[in-house]
Image (cartoon, rainbow, N blue to C red):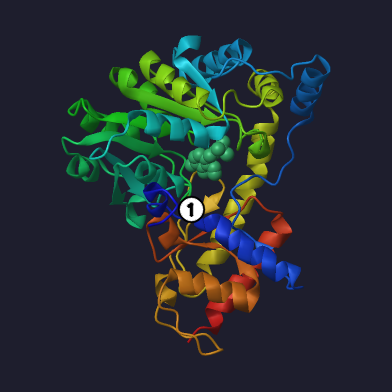
Amino acid sequence: MSFFADALKRIKPSPTIAISGKARELKAAGRDVIGLAAGEPDFDTPDNIKEAAINAIRRGETKYTAVDGIPELKAAICRKFKRENGLDYKPSQITVGTGGKQVLYNALMATLNPGDEVIIPAPYWVSYPDIVLLAGATPVTVKTRPEDGYKLTAAALEKAITPKTKWLIFNSPSNPTGAAYSHADIKALTDVLLKHPQVWVLTDDMYEHLVYDDFVFATPAQVEPRLYERTLTMNGVSKAYCMTGWRIGYAGGPEQLIKAMGTLQSQSTTNPNTIAQWAAVEALDGPQDFIPANNKVFKERRDLVVSMLNQASGLTCPKPEGAFYVYPSCAGAIGKTTPSGKRIENDEDFVTELLEAEGVAVVHGSAFGLGPAFRISYATATSDLEEACRRIQRFCGSLR
Ligand SMILES: Cc1ncc(COP(=O)(O)O)c(C=O)c1O
């Protein structure tokens, strides 16, 4: 009999962290490695946000706070939801956690029982199915198609819903594909959900601000107000405000759910870091002009990477509207052989051989539930991206 909990057998360590570890090992051994596996902006946290944290320390804001967030941050989040999403939430409908990941974890743990089903469009952010499994419930993955821009269609959603469906996890712009759902795309899905009152929506809006080419962001409770009572709108400061290490995420939703999530948090981590909460107040209330400036750089990088990857033999790379990822298909490379004589059977072989041969670290698509493909994060210096794409082209060209 194992000492460890059965629940642990249902989950696996994050594959994105595993590939980053392999890249680090090779680097330490003296190899020239370009890492394109990490999901965080390479830009530093803006100075006004850092100053707000330093001032909080100086004022002595260094104690425990209310479990699910200080009133000042909850008020700033209510203003954000109103200003940017047209959503009315009261402070009692807001919860703040240690990163978006904890908020998501709390929501699923507080609501799921064995037998419950959660619809997750694939490819997905790796934590969704594993948190559902940890809660003892069943992830129902629905594969999207490159020809639909990797977006869930109304027909596919309708087909996946059963009387046991409790949540749809919705993520736009998406990690790992960068796909972003327009107002009309969302409306098609919410029209389906209106017919199924047992299904709640957990929307992960983490990449809201990272959209390009005049794309207009929308979120389900805004598109369909009749779903407001069964939607949890999750967001955070990690990506747009370059604050991944500060660990602040939040959500707005029905009061009873928010309260249940707070109860869970009170028995695990208590309040999110006090100093980081004050920094998040400044992030949401302070100047927002660095966001379009960063986005200009991200857009140029996206265009560069998409264009260079589409010139690599055997790759096809759609141009997504958001986040900082692209998700090229490597179907054209499967079945081929490297100059060293290794046959590429699947996308995991492709990324392993690419790392070996050219020192470029990317994550295989099967880790996100849909291959053969791989994810590139373009939140990396432009010169490194250009060199990495040249190496990918050379690698693809060397396959026979
Ligand atoms: C889609 C998505 N949701 C949530 C998160 C978690 O964000 P946080 O770092 O705030 O926990 C991430 C981070 O990679 C993400 O990509």
Residue type at mark 1: give it: Lys
Q: Quadrant of the N terminus?
A: bottom left
Is the CB–ligand 1 distance for label 1 below 8 Å? no
Coordinates of residue 42 in the picture (x, y in percent) = 70, 47
Classify residue 222 by image quadrant.
top left
Coordinates of residue 248 in the picture (x, y in percent) = 60, 30
Classify residue 200 by image quadrant.
top left
Q: Is residue 20 above or below residue 185?
A: below
In the displayed structure image, the side of residue 75 where residue 286 appears, left or right: right
Residue at position x 39%, y 81% from top? 335
Coordinates of residue 322 in the picture (x, y in percent) = 51, 43
Name of the residue lying farthest toward the right: 58
Residue 350 visible to an observer of this rendering: yes
Q: Secondary structure at mark 1?
A: loop
Residue at position x 38%, y 37% from top? 170
Closest to the observer: 69 or 174? 69
Q: Is residue 313 above or below residue 35?
A: below
Coordinates of residue 71 in the picture (x, y in percent) = 59, 10
Residue at position x 23%, y 36% from top? 165
Classify residue 347 by image quadrant.
bottom left
Q: Which residue is mark 1?
A: 319
In the displayed structure image, the side of residue 237 where residue 95 appears, left or right: left
Q: Is residue 151 above or below residue 351?
A: above
